[in-house]
Image (tube, rainbow, N blue to C red):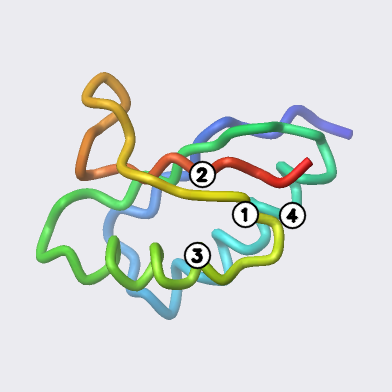
Amino acid sequence: MKDVPEAIDLHGLTVEEAIPRVDKFLNKAFRARVPRVWVIHGKGTGTLRSELRTYLSKHPLVARCSTADANRGGAGCTQVEIID
């Protein structure tokens, strides 16, 4: 399997465009046994971040998600822990 990037950049996408891409990304990360990934959504109005976090909190492959550390984008990025 090809290397899976550790982050996905969703800048400029709508929630409807972003969710299927995140789902595909998480599935690839899980199959590649990547333990942690980052979803870059930007700060903007906060709508994309909020909707993505709601989605991620219910996703079967996500153990937990949180705001990324400042050096990873802070409020503009969500850190996602993939289940074992």
Q: CA distance from mark 2 to mark 1?
A: 7 Å
Residue at image mark 4: 27
Q: Which is in the foreground here, disc 3 or disc 4?
A: 3
Q: Are marks 3 and 1 in contact (CB under 8 Å)?
A: yes
Q: CA distance from mark 2 to mark 4?
A: 12 Å
The answer to which image quadrant residue 67 occupies is top left
Q: Amino acid at mark 3?
A: Ser
Above/below status of 48 relative to 27: below
Where does residue 10 sit, x and y in percent of width and height? 38, 54
Above/below status of 5 relative to 80: above
Q: Which is in the foreground here, disc 2 or disc 4?
A: 2
Q: CA distance from mark 3 to mark 4?
A: 15 Å
Q: Amino acid at mark 1?
A: Val
- For the view shown, which residue lies furthest in the right direction? 1
Precedes in sequence: disc 3 or disc 2: 3
Q: CA distance from mark 3 to mark 1?
A: 7 Å
Q: Amino acid at mark 2?
A: Val
Q: Which mark is residue 57?
A: 3
Q: Are marks 2 and 1 in contact (CB under 8 Å)?
A: yes
Residue drawn at the location 75% of the way across and 47% of the way down:
28
Where does residue 40 sit, x and y in percent of width and height? 36, 44
Q: Which mark is residue 80?
A: 2
Where does residue 36 sit, x and y in percent of width and height? 59, 33
81 or 5, nearer to the observer:
81
Which structural element holds mark 4? helix
Above/below status of 8 relative to 11: above
The answer to which image quadrant residue 78 occupies is top left
